[in-house]
Image: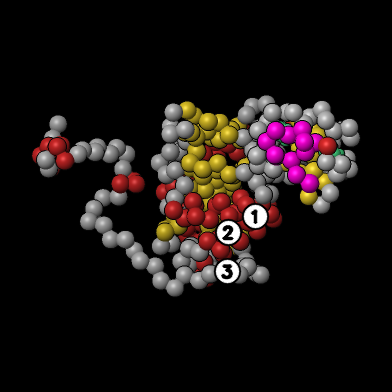
């Protein structure tokens, strides 16, 4: 919304309600409230004698938020059957580049895997790995994963949180963003740091891929984004790299749901298309294997 109501100034007189041609202002608890129908027409800006309606850019200046406590780049490291998924290493590569520009560190959260997997994350570029090997985190469960990630974010205040746009990431990362009341950009193809403001520039295709949109989250922290596998580049693997492993306890974290069984999809394919560098696709007209010969 381009305008907000400063509730400390609003007397609840209701004058602004009639000024809005989109029925976007309502009274709640004797204070004006702008709802989702706001069309940014700015008709209401001048009507409030109390000065309670302000344009958002002015409001931001008035209540500039201090994000100096939010520093590092945290990635959610996904594992499958105890093995770290390749997308996690790609996220570390992206996080290293962003952390380099911000002058901060790269942290990773790894759930349901062991210390060897955590060490691999360090060799790929993580400075610190938050590890919880508790067996209750297997198999994946939206409820407990979102609780643990939310707790780690609240305790450590990263400026940026990245996760893979995989079925697991897509399933629970929006819950975390909602719990933290912050923004989330899905399926980013490019992540940059704004040189002036140090905000994360989250670039993703929009409107059916016809334009590339740059999305910012300037007013809330952390800035959260998911990235599809094979989009970001891994950093260099360094066998001798050292980092810190911090054990995370599940104290007080419970799950309202329990996975009782999971069905693994069987595929006739003997290759993993997710890991392929190039995929050549052909239709029925190719007629079979021979039709693909160059
Ligand atoms: S006109 Fe101003 S004081 Fe009156 S309800 Fe609207 S925002 Fe509040
Ligand atoms: S900006 Fe326009 S649409 Fe939005 S609340 Fe004000 S009058 Fe209504």
Label 2 near ligand 2 (CB < 8 Å): no
> Who's the residue at 14% across and 37% down the image?
285
Q: Position of residue 33 (x, y in %)?
A: 76, 44
Question: For residue 25: magenta?
Answer: yes
Pointers 2 and 1 in contact (CB under 8 A)?
yes
Q: Which numbered disc, 2 or 1, marks the residue that appears first in the sequence?
A: 2
Query: In the rendered image, which residue does mark 2 sit on?
Result: 146
| Frontmost residue, 36 versus 159 | 36
Disc ID at residue 32: none
**At which x and y percent is residue 259?**
47, 70
Disc number for residue 255: 3
Quadrant containing ligand 2: top right
Residue 179: assigned label: 1
Q: CA distance from mark 2 to mark 1?
A: 9 Å
First reached walking from the N terminus: tag 2 or tag 3: 2
Tell me, yes or no, if residue 106 can be seen here: no
Judging depth in this view, the residue of 260 and 55 nearest the camera is: 55
Does label 3 point to a residue whose CB lies under 8 Å from ligand 2? no
* Identity of the residue drawn at 75% across and 44% down: 26
Query: What span is colored magenta in the figure?
Result: 16-27
Residue 103 vertical position relative to residue 152 in the rendered view, above or below: above
Mark 1 lies on a secondary structure that is helix
Protein image colouring = secondary structure
As measured in the structure, the alpha-carbon distance from the residue carrying label 2 to the one carrying label 3 is: 10 Å
Point 61% across, 50% down: residue: 177
Q: Are marks 2 and 3 in contact (CB under 8 Å)?
A: no
Q: Quarter-wise, where is residue 283 in the image?
A: top left
């Amino acid at each position: 919304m381009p305008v907000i109501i400063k509730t400390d100034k609003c007397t609840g007189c209701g004058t602004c309600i009639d000024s809005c041609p989109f029925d976007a202002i309502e009274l709640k608890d004797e204070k004006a409230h702008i709802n989702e129908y706001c069309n940014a027409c700015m008709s209401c800006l001048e009507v409030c004698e109390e000065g309670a309606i302000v344009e958002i850019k002015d409001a931001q200046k008035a209540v500039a938020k201090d994000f100096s406590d939010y520093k590092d780049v945290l990635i959610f490291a996904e594992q499958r059957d105890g093995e770290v998924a390749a997308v996690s290493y790609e996220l570390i590569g992206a996080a290293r580049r962003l952390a380099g520009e911000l002058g901060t560190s790269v942290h990773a959260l790894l759930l349901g895997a062991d210390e060897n997997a955590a060490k691999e994350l360090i060799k790929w570029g993580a400075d610190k790995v938050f590890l919880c090997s508790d067996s209750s985190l297997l198999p994946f469960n939206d409820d407990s994963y979102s609780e643990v990630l939310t707790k780690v974010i609240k305790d450590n205040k990263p400026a940026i949180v990245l996760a893979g746009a995989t079925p697991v990431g897509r399933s629970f990362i929006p819950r975390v963003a909602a719990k933290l009341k912050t923004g989330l950009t899905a399926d980013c193809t490019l992540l940059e740091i704004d040189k002036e403001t140090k905000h994360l520039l989250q670039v993703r295709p929009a409107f059916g891929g016809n334009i590339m949109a740059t999305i910012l989250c300037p007013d809330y922290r952390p800035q959260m984004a998911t990235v599809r596998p094979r989009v970001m580049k891994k950093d260099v693997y360094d066998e001798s790299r050292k980092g810190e492993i911090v054990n995370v306890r599940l104290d007080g974290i419970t799950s309202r749901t329990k996975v009782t069984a999971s069905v693994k999809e069987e595929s006739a394919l003997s290759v993993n298309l997710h890991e392929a560098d190039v995929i050549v696709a052909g239709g029925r007209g190719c007629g079979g294997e021979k039709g693909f010969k160059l």
